[in-house]
Image: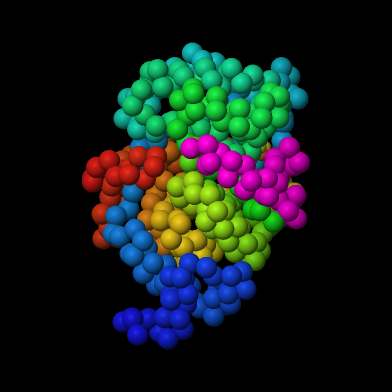
């Protein structure tokens, strides 16, 4: 018996180590073990897979446009694309604006630029190419992580290119990784309630991920939780990601995104009236570590959504990464959260829980211990 684990915990620990929990086993595990048992398992597995180090990237976000052809009920960021020219709430950054953002990123010492925006039907593929080449021209040493998988798919559809052509051109323009966003929840019934048809299905997201990864462009994976999904939907989502990774390697990490409900249509419709509890947040992190297995060394705790205090506990329940500094982030900000952090304060949060902070690059290689 492993010291400190009960016989039930030990059984599930061994099954988790094998890395192939089925949907019904994951369900049984989550009703068999209480939160603290799950946390203990998550912590043990983290120690084996990722050690004592907690990483984060010095990341600068650029949100190039908030016009969007979709109108997802989970989103507070978008302005309907059809209102372009009729409202002053929408924006599109010009290349000069991008250059100004690059200057700010340079001053903050960013090693990664993270670019996402709405589904803007007015922008040609050349706009994206120029944006990416401009970033790389003025910041040649940064890693460029750009666009969610549904955004790439949308650009392909609206510009009349195949997904492969868009990815090829992104790579030529300097994009090193995709962001992994837009996965939301794969269950089609839940997806129908939180997105609109302009956003690809969960099945297509997974198919596109495999194509993009096979072309040598890795990226993160995500899940948005804390809205109208059930625990079964969360388990299903994680198992689909694990199986996808086993078929075609390419995910660098898993980042569960706590739904930030303020100002969203889901809040206005009265469908979500409070954020997920800290208990759910911690359970999600532990279950991610338990279900995703060896193919996902990195389970990220997105402190912008979870807050610093719950994030610190989450790092002891299965997390080994804090994502990044989120300088200039606008999407969570649209929901009334305004969080960014200095490198020093993130390092301090990690030290407070007895772990070792380290800055990493986009590919989770350690740049330096802090
Ligand atoms: S979540 Fe993305 S695709 Fe959906 S409305 Fe917001 S910006 Fe558009």
Q: Quadrant of the C terminus?
A: top left
Q: Residue furthest top?
A: 96
Apparent side of residue 60 relative to residue 236 in the rendered image (left or right): left
Tell me if I can see residue 215 in this picture: yes
The part of the chain drawn in magenta is: 188-216
Image quarter of residue 14: bottom left
Apparent side of residue 235 relative to residue 359 in the rendered image (left or right): right
For residue 246, above or below residue 124? below
For residue 183, above or below residue 275? above
Q: Is residue 142 magenta?
A: no
Residue beneath the point at 61% across and 69% down: 23
Apparent side of residue 316 relative to residue 153 in the rendered image (left or right): left
For residue 213, above or below residue 310? above
Residue beneath the point at 23% across and 46% down: 369
Residue 172 placement (x, y as % from top left): 49, 23
Ligand 1: give its quadrant: top right
């Amino acid at each position: 018996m492993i010291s400190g684990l009960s016989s039930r915990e030990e059984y599930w620990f061994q099954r988790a180590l094998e890395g192939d929990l089925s949907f019904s086993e994951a369900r049984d595990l989550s009703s068999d073990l209480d939160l603290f048992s799950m946390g203990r398992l998550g912590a043990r597995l983290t120690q084996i897979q990722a050690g004592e180090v907690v990483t984060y990237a010095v990341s600068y976000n650029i949100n190039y446009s908030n016009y969007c052809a979709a109108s997802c009920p989970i989103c507070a960021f978008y302005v309907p694309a059809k209102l372009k020219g009729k409202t002053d709430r929408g924006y599109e950054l010009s290349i000069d604006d991008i250059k100004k953002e690059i200057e700010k990123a340079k001053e903050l010492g960013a090693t990664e630029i993270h670019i996402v925006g709405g589904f803007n039907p007015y922008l040609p593929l050349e706009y994206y190419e120029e944006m990416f080449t401009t970033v790389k021209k003025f910041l040649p040493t940064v890693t460029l992580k750009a666009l969610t998988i549904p955004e790439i798919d949308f650009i392909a559809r609206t510009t009349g290119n195949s997904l492969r052509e868009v990815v090829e051109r992104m790579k030529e323009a300097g994009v090193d990784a995709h962001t992994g966003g837009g996965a939301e929840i794969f269950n089609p019934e839940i997806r129908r309630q939180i997105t609109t048809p302009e956003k690809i299905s969960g099945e297509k997201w997974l198919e596109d991920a495999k194509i993009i990864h096979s072309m040598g462009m890795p990226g993160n994976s995500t899940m948005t939780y804390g809205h109208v999904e059930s625990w079964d939907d969360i388990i299903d989502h994680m198992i689909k990601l694990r199986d996808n990774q086993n078929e075609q390697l390419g995910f660098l990490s898993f980042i569960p995104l706590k739904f930030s409900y303020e100002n969203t249509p889901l809040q206005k419709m009265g469908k979500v009236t409070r954020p997920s509890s800290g208990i759910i947040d911690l359970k999600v992190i532990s279950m991610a570590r338990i279900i995703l297995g060896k193919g996902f060394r990195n389970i990220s705790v997105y402190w912008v959504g979870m807050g610093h205090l719950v994030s610190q506990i989450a790092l002891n329940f299965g997390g080994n990464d804090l994502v990044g500094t989120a300088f200039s982030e606008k999407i969570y900000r649209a929901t009334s959260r305004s969080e960014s952090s200095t490198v020093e304060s993130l390092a301090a949060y990690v030290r407070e829980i007895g772990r070792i902070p380290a800055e990493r690059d986009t590919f989770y290689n350690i740049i330096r211990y802090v």
